């Protein structure tokens, strides 16, 4: 395990968030009550997803400039972890919505935007699996990945702000003004975002290494 | 893993530093009677710490598994290289 400092940092921050996230004082707000602590777990999913998808696009662009199979593997595994985190984000958001807004799902622009964006990324996985030729698969899914990112990000962060929405950070609301002004919550929220994002990169790295190893073993068998 | 001990100590120190503000909860003032309901009773009876302990154990277990997986993979990569 070389260059492990960021993995150790992720472990430390996540353990800290688990303890401090439940025990640190939070603002006393009606309706939200203690569920405000979901901010430390639900929101970092989306942060982590955004950063890992940026990494995925970065690898896709690099693949198109220099078609190495390693770059394709890294782009694919990063996108997969991003999709996983997005799905967890949707599920946790749905639970939170049930107990604060009173419904598992509302036709809120932020929620629907996120769901559509996840479907766009789901199509990325379907598209990938429909090719038998590796180079064709890598090239076309790299191009799709760039377009998927360019479509998904406005759906997450721009379009919901243009209309009314219940969700914080939409409907013209600045994202965290209400909670994040609270300096106690900042002490946990920022470490949570960093910790979960690093975990996403760690998982993507592990998945990529397994795929790379598989590729190497396969090439050895052919030789 | 020769110089892992100082690194471990540094990580532990960082964790302890981060945990310092948690201690303030012990001195948290009781809320005004008309303020929204929070899990004060849970804290007073001390049971919330049970949940915190359980979550910490679960998370630590998962992270430990991830670390061991990472190491196994590193070993395998070395083997394939040779």
Image: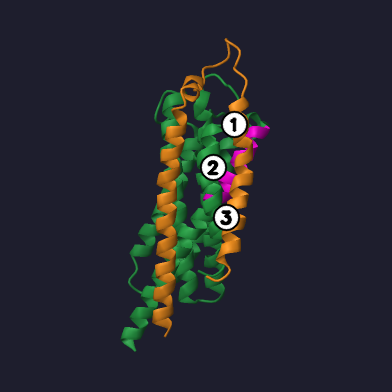
Chain colours: A green, B orange
Q: Against B12, is A140 above or below?
A: below
Q: Earlier in the sequence, mark 1 or mark 2?
A: 2
Subunit that carries the residue with mark 1: A
Q: Is residue A185 magenta?
A: yes
Q: Which residue is mark 1?
A: A171
Q: Find the distance from the CA under tag 1 to the CA under tag 3.
A: 35 Å
- Residue drawn where x is 43% and y is 34% of the image: B51
User: Which residue is denoted by mark 3 in the rendering?
Assistant: A9
Would residue B10 be found to the left or right of residue B70 on screen?
Answer: right
Residue A8's spot in the image, x, y percent?
Answer: 54, 57
Q: Mark 1: which secondary structure? A: loop
The stretch of residues the image draws in magenta is: A183-196
Residue B3 location (% of width, % of height): 58, 68
Q: Are marks 1 and 3 in contact (CB under 8 Å)?
A: no
Q: Which residue is labeled 2 in the image?
A: A17
Front-lying residue, A60 or A94:
A94
In the rendered image, the residue lying farthest to the bottom is A223
Q: Residues within 10 Å of mark 3 (few under 14, many from 20)?
A: some
Q: Are marks 1 and 2 in contact (CB under 8 Å)?
A: no
The disc numbered 2 marks a residue on which chain? A
Comparing A72 with A216, the one in front is: A216
N-terminal of the pair, mark 1 or mark 3, is 3
């Amino acid at each position: 395990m070389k260059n492990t400092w960021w993995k150790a940092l992720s472990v430390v921050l996540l353990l800290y968030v688990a303890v401090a996230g439940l025990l640190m004082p939070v603002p006393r707000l009606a309706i939200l009550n203690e569920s405000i602590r979901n901010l430390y777990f639900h929101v970092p999913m989306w942060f982590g997803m955004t950063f890992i998808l940026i990494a995925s696009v970065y690898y896709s662009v690099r693949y198109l400039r220099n078609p190495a199979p390693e770059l394709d593997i890294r782009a694919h595994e990063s996108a997969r972890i991003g999709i996983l985190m997005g799905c967890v984000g949707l599920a946790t958001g749905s639970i939170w919505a049930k107990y604060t807004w009173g419904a598992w799902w509302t036709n809120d622009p932020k929620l629907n935007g996120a769901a559509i964006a996840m479907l766009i990324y789901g199509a990325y996985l379907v598209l990938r699996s429909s090719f038998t030729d590796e180079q064709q698969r890598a090239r076309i899914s790299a191009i799709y990945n760039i377009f998927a990112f360019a479509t998904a990000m406005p759906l997450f962060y721009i379009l919901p702000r243009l209309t009314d929405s219940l969700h914080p950070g939409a409907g013209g609301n600045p994202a965290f003004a209400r909670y994040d002004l609270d300096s106690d919550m900042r002490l946990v929220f920022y470490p949570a975002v960093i910790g979960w994002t690093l975990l996403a990169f760690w998982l993507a790295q592990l998945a990529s290494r397994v795929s790379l190893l598989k590729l190497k073993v396969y090439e050895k068998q052919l030789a | 893993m020769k110089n892992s001990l100082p690194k471990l100590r540094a990580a532990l120190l960082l964790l302890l530093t981060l945990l310092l503000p948690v201690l303030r909860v012990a001195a948290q003032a009781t809320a005004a009677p008309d303020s929204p309901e929070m899990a004060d009773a849970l804290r007073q009876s001390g049971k919330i710490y049970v949940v915190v302990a359980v979550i910490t154990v679960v998370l630590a277990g998962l992270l430990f598994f991830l670390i061991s997986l990472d190491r196994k993979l590193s070993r395998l990569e070395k083997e394939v290289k040779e």
